[in-house]
Amino acid sequence: MTSLTSASPKRTGGAPAVRQSAASRLARAPWGLYLAIAFAALLLVAVIAPQLLTTHLPTAIDYGAALQPPSWAHPFGTDESGRDLYTRIVWGARDSLTIGVGAAAVSIGLALILGTLAALGVKPVALVVDRFVEILFTFPALLLALLLIAIAGPSAATQVLAVGVGTAPGYARMIRGQILGARNSGYVEAATALGHSRWRIVRAHILPNALRPLVAVFALSIGQSIVWASSLSFLGLGVAPPASEWGALLDAGRAYLTTAWWLVVVPGLVIVAVALAATTIGRYIQARLEKGERS
């Protein structure tokens, strides 16, 4: 079967090459994988029970402590209203990860439908779907997301839909290539020679082998979706204040970039760390799948 790496399109949403290279090195290093898993577990706690990791409320205002730099009392500093930035980042993990996972699910789900129809549909349907994916692929992902938000208005649900639809075309082309590669494989030819029906071949041989790498792709797309969603929030097109979604924190902090650098730098580093952890775990899963195919 064609490997996931060779079948990947040139653009699946714009993940930076430097981050991919760093994630590849981390995935090969046991300590890097363990660090990514530990960070993911910490994020899970932040989503389920953020009060276990904080001693403040994300909306607690203290104007006397406004714009304080990182200290023992406030490890990540405070914002213009005196709210503890560490607390807001922890409580914002739920919104950010929900948007990221939701957008990844929309992206992979839509790509699965389009890619399967383009590869296995009857000729007229496959041709139409293939052209439709190519049209979507010509739009930059951010431009397509901005178009959807301009139509539906900014909200968390719109972010999920916009990022999911914007990144789906690249994954659809990858899935189409995977299915076509599996359809032309030797085990499919053998099943055809044995007289198996077309549906049985698709269900038992083509789809399981072609779509197995989607486990890794989904993990990879979570980090990518969080970055895209944060970019939209940074442009003021995401969750409205006073939400502590990470992109919204970036948007709120850019007005104080020269006087309170931590309001932008710290949320930005958290977004990069989450994307890197998700990418590292995804690449490890991908490597294990490819190793299993070769063995």
Image (cartoon, grey):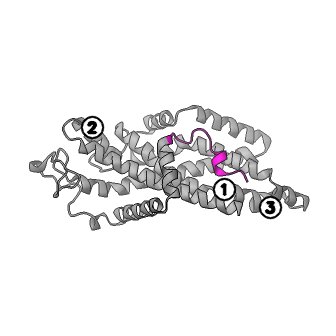
Q: Could you tell me which quadrant the C terminus lies in?
A: bottom right
Stretch in magenta:
1-17
Amino acid carrying label 3: it is Arg
Residue 258 place in picture, x, y as percent: 21, 35
Give the residue displayed 65% in from the left and 58% down from the top: 290
Q: Could you tell me which quadrant the N terminus lies in?
A: bottom right
Residue contact between numbered discs 1 and 3, judged by CB atoms under 8 Å: no
Cα distance between the residues tagged 3 and 2? 56 Å
Amino acid carrying label 2: it is Arg
Residue of label 3: 200
Residue 40 place in picture, x, y as percent: 42, 61
Q: Is residue 104 visible?
A: no
Residue of label 1: 211
Residue 11 place in picture, x, y as percent: 57, 39
Cα distance between the residues tagged 1 and 3? 16 Å
Residue 130, located in which quarter of the rendered image? top right
Give the residue displayed 65% in from the left and 49% down from the top: 113
Question: Is disc 1 placed on a helix, strand or loop?
Answer: helix
Residue of label 2: 254
Q: Is residue 198 above or below residue 107?
A: below
Q: Is residue 5 magenta?
A: yes
192 left or right, relative to 281:
right
Q: Which mark is residue 264?
A: none
Badge 3 or badge 2: first in the primary sequence: 3
Amino acid carrying label 1: it is Leu
228 left or right, relative to 207:
left
In-front residue for pair 148/215: 215
Q: Is residue 45 magenta?
A: no
Q: Nearer the viewer, mark 1 or mark 3?
A: 1
